[in-house]
Image (cartoon, coloured by chain):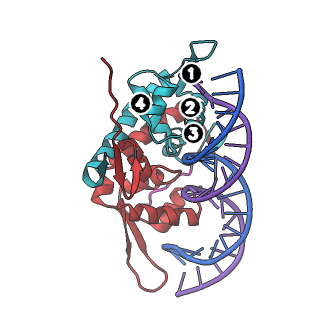
Chain colours: A red, B cyan, C purple, D blue
Amino acid sequence: MEIEHKKRLIKYNDKLFSCTTSIAMELIGGKWKSVILIYLIDGKKRYNELYKLISTITERTLSLQLKQLEKDGLITRKVYTKKPPLKVEYELTPFGKTLAPVLTSIANWGKIVADKKGEIIE
Amino acid sequence: MEIEHKKRLIKYNDKLFSCTTSIAMELIGGKWKSVILIYLIDGKKRYNELYKLISTITERTLSLQLKQLEKDGLITRKVYTKKPPLKVEYELTPFGKTLAPVLTSIANWGKIVADKKGEIIE
DNA sequence: CCGTATCCCTGTAGATACTG
DNA sequence: CAGTATCTACAGGGATACGG
């Protein structure tokens, strides 16, 4: 009696994935996405707020990642002023909010790792 | 009364991270790591088993990712034969096993996404 | 069976400077 | 304030062929 592994591929946004984990990582993987999302869990944030919170990200990268997250329907971008200085706020969509338990789960595990082997600087 | 955001950086493996989420993603991020780990949750697997399960990965990439996971202490590699054909098995370490709830959380969320917007092929 | 060796391409990301 | 514009660098990952 052999276990049969059926190879169902899933198409999402015109890309093929071999399992649901792949799809999830496509949306929240990469170096910065999940970090940005974590900070948006407790409410909307302005561009500069995020920039200061994620101290080691560059402006360019933050901008690109925010666009990606918006494109994937995880966050919304709202502009509140027409003339400079601009006020732009980013906020989780209802879809993005369904990620909250996943993200905190990741963060908590990261905390365990940090407590065991990490070293706090400054 | 202002909320103060202290900027503590965490050093892990000689790299700096701005939050615990970053550390977690350093270990399980990327396109394949979490997928490999998910398949190892229900027991050790041989190289070729993993290769067949993750149908869209290449041999080279699988090999590289397994080395990374081993280096990070998430899996162990055991060789059971001395002459070809080799038998090599990969298994989660106790540390790797602490990831199980996180990984299933990611996979379940991916499943929700797939059910809503994904399309099953074949 | 379990990988390595090459080669190459692309995406991610950093540094820096500039703008409406 | 909230980004763009360039330019650069490197790691992740794919294709293919080969090796103990």
Indicate the chain on which mark 1 is placed: B
The CA span between labels 2 and 1 is 9 Å
Indicate the chain on which mark 2 is placed: B
The CA span between labels 1 and 4 is 15 Å
Q: For the residues tagged 2 and 1, is the chain the same?
A: yes
Residue nearest the viewer, comparing B59 with A94: B59
Residue on which disc 4 sits: B39
Q: For the residues tagged 1 and 3, is the chain the same?
A: yes
Dot 1 or dot 4, earlier in sequence? 4
Magenta stretch holds residue B116? no
- Residue B17 visible: no
Give the secondary structure at mark 3: helix
In the displayed structure, would residue B69 be above or below residue A73?
A: above
Indicate the chain on which mark 3 is placed: B
Q: For the residues tagged 1 and 4, is the chain the same?
A: yes
Residue on which disc 2 sits: B66
Image quadrant in which you'd find residue B40? top left
Pointer 4 local density, CA inside 10 Å: few below 14, some 14–19, many at least 20: some
What amino acid does circle 4 point to? Tyr
Q: Kindly check if marks 1 and 3 are in contact, taking CB atoms under 8 A apart as contact.
A: no
- Residue B58 visible: yes
Dot 1 or dot 3, earlier in sequence? 3
Left or right, A78 with respect to B49, comes to left
Indicate the chain on which mark 4 is placed: B
**First to last magenta residue range:** B1-9
Judged by its main secondary structure, the magenta piece is loop
The CA span between labels 3 and 4 is 16 Å
In front: mark 1 or mark 3?
Answer: 3
Dot 4 or dot 2, earlier in sequence? 4
Residue on which disc 3 sits: B61
Residue on which disc 1 sits: B77
